[in-house]
Amino acid sequence: MPSASCRARIEGEGHMTSIELKPGDRVRLNELGASRSPKIKVRTGVVVAFSGNRSGGASLGILFDGNKRPTTLHRSYVELDEEAKGK
């Protein structure tokens, strides 16, 4: 299980809400991410890595469902997948 020091704080685009992500969290592309990355067809995946320092890197490694390798995206492009959280 990842330690608390391995979490990333993510601020939402245009407002002051923030969420914390850790490796293993299910995420999906938000509206901004979908519009800026139109070639990404699968919209949900799992956080597998952080760039830069361990807790505040601007990029995340996301292993999208069905892919073999993670995709690096800016943290403002993803949000927690609440549907998967309820399952």
Image: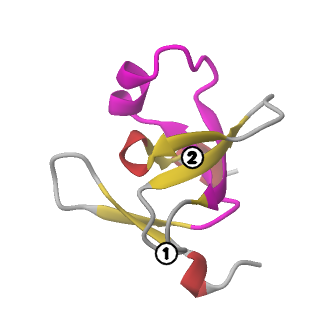
Q: Is residue 34 above or below residue 70?
A: above
Q: Position of residue 3 (x, y in %)?
A: 66, 85
Q: Position of residue 70 (x, y in %)?
A: 70, 41
Region in magenta: 22-49
Graded by Cα atoms within 10 Å as few (under 14), some (14 to 19) or many (20 or more), the crowding at tag 2 reads: many
- Say if 43 sits above or below 45 in the image: above
* Mark seen at residue 29: none
Residue 79 lies, in percent from the top left, at 45, 47
Q: Quadrant of residue 69?
A: top right
Q: Name the residue type under label 1.
A: Ser
> In the image as oriented, which residue stretches furthest toward the front?
52
Is 25 colored magenta in this rendering? yes
The image shows residue 53, relative to residue 86, as above or below, that is below
Element assignment for label 2: strand
Residue 32 covered by magenta stretch: yes
Q: Determine which residue is flagged by label 2.
A: 27
Q: Is residue 48 left or right of residue 9?
A: right
Q: Position of residue 84 (x, y in %)?
A: 64, 47
In the drawing, does residue 1 fall left or right of residue 13? right
The numbered mark at residue 55 is: 1
Q: How is the image coloured?
A: secondary structure
Q: Quadrant of residue 64?
A: top right
